[in-house]
Amino acid sequence: MGCGGCSTGSHQQPRGCKSNGGCSSGGCNRLNVHDWLRNLPFHDPNSSCKVVEISFKQGSRKDYFRNPSLHSYEKGDMVTVEGVGGFDVGEVSLTGELVRLQLKKKSLDEFNPEMKKILRLSNERDLESFHQQKAREKEVLARSRAAARQLKVPMKLSEIEIQADGKKATFFYTADDRVDFRELIKIFAADFKLKVEMRQIGIRQEAAKVGGIGSCGRELCCSTWLNDFKSVNTTAARYQNLSINQTKLSGQCGRLKCCLNYELDTYLDALQQFPDYAETLDTESGTAHLIKKDIFKNLMWYVLPNNTKHYPLTIQRVKEIKRLNREGQRVAELEPVEISSGKTREAEPAFVDLVGQISLRTLEKNERRKRDRERQKQQNRPDNRNQQGQGQGGQQRQSGQPAQGGQQRQGGQPGKNRSNQPSNRPRPNRPPSGGSRNDQRPPTN
């Protein structure tokens, strides 16, 4: 089984480090070493290194064990090794000639008779006991932190590693000063029934064990490949013209970032061609003070008093001004160089904004056209025509134009409708003014 986040391997082989290659993410095993000598043949197999590197707790701790048998172990094999008063289970992380180079790097003797040995390949019983003890670690860590808080011991427990046989536990902690934890060890031994070993580590080692993502977006160097920590101070930041901002220059461990030393040698080599004791230059306008050195453009930036403008000078010009100052002369002008970007602005490639072409107005127009088409289709149908004609007749009745032989009635008030709206019936002739209405009536039989 390998880590799911590792991109090594193929669809035919399981992912992860194992025997498929190196894991670049460090998720399978931290502080891995790529065995680039693995597939090279050797003429004398008897002279090969008999020491194997074993990692515990996914690379959190590594140790070296002798292989007394003729069995050859591969990277990723789970093996049972000698422990303190019992046995422990670890994973093979490196074999072959590279182990000899690692031993030389760490000043360890390959033929030391006191070096512990590999007992066997881990069987099911060993692995079952190993998984049971690993499952206890979180609970033991929580209870041990509660006990340390209750006794008010000034320490921080960061990790616990229990041996595979359950006979020993190593407590890793960080503290500013020396800690008296004798009473705490008694409580741990009585509660957990283990042999307790307290091991103090630094803050950087704690960050390496916990892991995380740095400000650069990658995994922490101390969790993936960095195993020796060098001192870092603010002088490295000054040589690289970095602003002394403790928040930006500090890593997750709270100390200065280890990456400040990575490019320091390059900056020191480049600064050797810059003149020494050139912090000030005497001019007729005043004393110019050095504020920055640009090793990429070989320029030195100065500023004059009562002026916020920055003047970039070449190295030759600064040396010339210093020579004149030693002779007692002051220059009239600094003669700064003109700074140009040096890059012609490239024409931006034309592209089609597919998102901008689709707007709400376009969608509304399309929807309106679709509705008009459907409405026109419904009007062209014969059934809809008859219904439309009947509907128009009803509308005429409501608008005051009823069909012939009918009377207009609306809202149940016939009197108002007759008086307010004209009728289509022929009206009788009105009598002239001054005459009576009875005189105009026709004779009756």
Image (spheres, grey):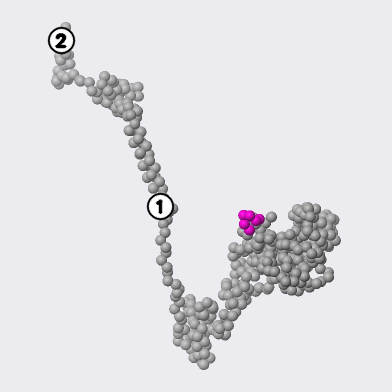
Camera-side residue: 408 or 336?
336
Q: Identify the residue at image location x=66%, y=68%.
A: 36
Camera-side residue: 166 or 72?
72
**Which disc, if any, is residue 24?**
none
Camera-side residue: 258 or 437?
258
Residue on which disc 2 sits? 443
Q: Residue 95's spot in the image, x, y percent?
A: 73, 66
Residue on which disc 1 sits? 357
Indicate the secondary structure of the residue bearing disc 2: loop
Q: Quadrant of residue 165?
A: bottom right
Q: Residue 347's spot in the image, x, y percent?
A: 41, 66
Apparent side of residue 284 relative to residue 117 in the rendered image (left or right): left
Q: Which residues are magenta?
A: 9-14
Count the marks: 2
Apparent side of residue 100 relative to residue 393 in the rendered image (left or right): right
The vertical placement of 100 against 182, above or below, is below
Q: Amino acid at mark 2?
A: Pro
Nearer the observer, disc 2 or disc 1? 1
